[in-house]
Amino acid sequence: MATIIINGEEHEIPEGEKLNAIQMAKRVGVEIPYYCWHPALSVVANCRMCEVEVGQKDPKTGEIKMLPKLVPGCQTPAKDGTVLVTNSDKVQEHQRMIMELLLINHPLDCPVCDQAGECGLQDYSYAHGQANHRFVEERIVNPKKDVSDLIQLNQDRCIMCTRCVRFTREITQTAELQVMRRGNHAEIATFPGVTLDDNPLAGNVVDLCPVGALLDKDFLHKQRVWFLSKHDSICTGCSGGCNISVEENKGKVWRVKPRNNPHVNDYWICDNSRYGYKAGAAPDDVIPGMFVLDKSGDHVQTPIDEALRRVVRGLRNAVVDGKAVAGVLSPFLTVEEAYLMARYLKDVTTSSVLALGPVPVKGEDRTFAPDKTKGRSGDTTFLVPRPFTIHAEKAPNARGVRAVVENSQGSVVDYADLLKKIEAGEVGALYVTGGYPEDWIDEATAAMIREKVGFIVVQDSRVSALAHKADVVLAGGTYAEKAGSYVNCDNRLQYAGASLPPRDGSLPDLDLFGVLLDRPGPVRSGEVLAEVAEAIPAFAAVKGGVVPKYGVVLGGEAAPENGQPPFVDAWFTPMGAAKSR
């Protein structure tokens, strides 16, 4: 087994892993500060913050020979016999010098900076800098400028790490950003006549920026990050299943940021995911409570228990004259919700027809493949970043719902085929679930369903054309108000936690189905997932209801997904970052 020596202690290096000094040190609990390095971008070593003492141990004599100068940790491979010293006086003095250099022209406006509380410059200045500021000359002042409609550049705060430039050149390969001029006059700028507006991954440059130079105007001056609670979730905007962090305060979502998953989205999310939280977590036309249709044809708000009793009576009474009870299982349901809904409808009558709701598709898949001639992909020392795809299929769990329906009735009824059954008068009662961020049914189809079906239940978070005509309207949860599992386009099952409590007058869909099934509450998604794993062979990989951190491919082996990721999990964890309460 190969070994590496860090600050006088020997550590074993796992076979087959090729990491640099920063990654290996973090693996054993030693932090080497850095700014310009990122595990998905090329290595430029221009911030010099990660310089450490490096040497090599002779395997035969045991003699250690150190290099005379400090070496950037980002460019130093961690191999057998490598010796690293990260805490010597020489290294600490170098870090103080670098921090002083980076702060020479910095405005030191932390109290009014939106990055305060999660700023790498702020944290490293406290940990590795010095209290006195010796620079008394006039500082260079640059005006603020917009690089897109949603991104503001404060050049005064920039430390020229060039992460944003490398991202647009290597990941999206659109190259909107550049370094203009040289020396202390250098600054980040867009090419003339070019902005980041047409780049669907542009918001990632804000996440990449370790200081307060690039800021999201959607979040600017709205919240202090130490007031935010972070919740691990999954993006429901398409079938990719990108891992996200939903950040809220006092029951309101304020921003969404990416979480690293090396098997899904690497370190990125698209701008639709980043800014789609407004329509997904708090739509303008949200259903405010439970409603039933009275004798006059008007919807009247009613308590939850009375609305659910109306559902039970209506579905049971509709099983007459050979007509069927049908259910439309939305591709926006979680696996657990779909399972309980299918069970309930089959309990009402074993002949219930289960159909997968319409799966929205927009355009074509758009894939951003990282430049394979640059960065870590061109160096065997580092791992190749995965491509990022914005999927045309705009539903998060069509595969998971389909697997549940197939297990319940042997095959999946297509939504279009169900509409034909309804038009033919074969359906006596219909239970429809939604969760779509946009309108999914038109007025003509809703009118046809109302004319042909005797009893209609709509369970949704938004008001739709069919909700206006339903006998019972149940206010379900938005994606942020519920916990559960989703199966993405690669058949990977992942877990999303609830970010917000249920809004007044509503219940998460899982609890609504739990009440209908007379399950003792509250219904826990993990317990339901354990039942799913026992009942449906395709979900056997999540036996016990436990989903690995990075998810698990259904039908595959769970063990490889649980191991240590092949590189640093979080590229930067600021000491002052907001944490989930």
Image: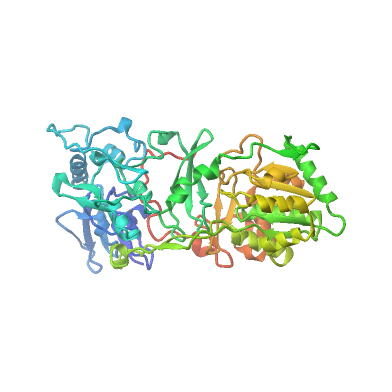
Left or right relative to 436: residue 562? left
In the image, 271: left or right of 482?
left
The percent coordinates of residue 62 (x first, y second) are 24, 64
Residue at x 49% of width, y 64% of height: 560
Tell me where residue 564 sits by quadrant.
bottom left
Labels in figure, total: 0
- Residue 82, by quadrant, is bottom left
At 38% from the left and 64% from the top, the residue drawn is: 369
State the image coordinates of residue 25 (x, y, percent, origin top left).
Answer: 32, 54
Question: Can residue 523 be seen from the camera position used here?
Answer: no
User: In terms of depth relative to the viewer, which is nearer, 292 or 96?
Assistant: 292
Query: Relative to 86, is 373 above or below?
Result: below
Q: Is residue 186 above or below residue 220?
A: below
Percent x, y of residue 13: 35, 62
Residue pushed farthest front?
Answer: 444
**Residue lying at the far left of the rendered structure:** 137
Looking at this rendering, what residue extends furthest in the top direction? 111
* Colouring used for the render: rainbow
**Which one is in front, 320 or 82?**
320
Q: Is residue 189 visible?
A: yes
Given residues 17 and 280, the one toward you in this image is 280
Q: Quadrant of the N terminus?
A: bottom left
Where residue 352 appears, as percent x and y from the top left, is: 78, 59
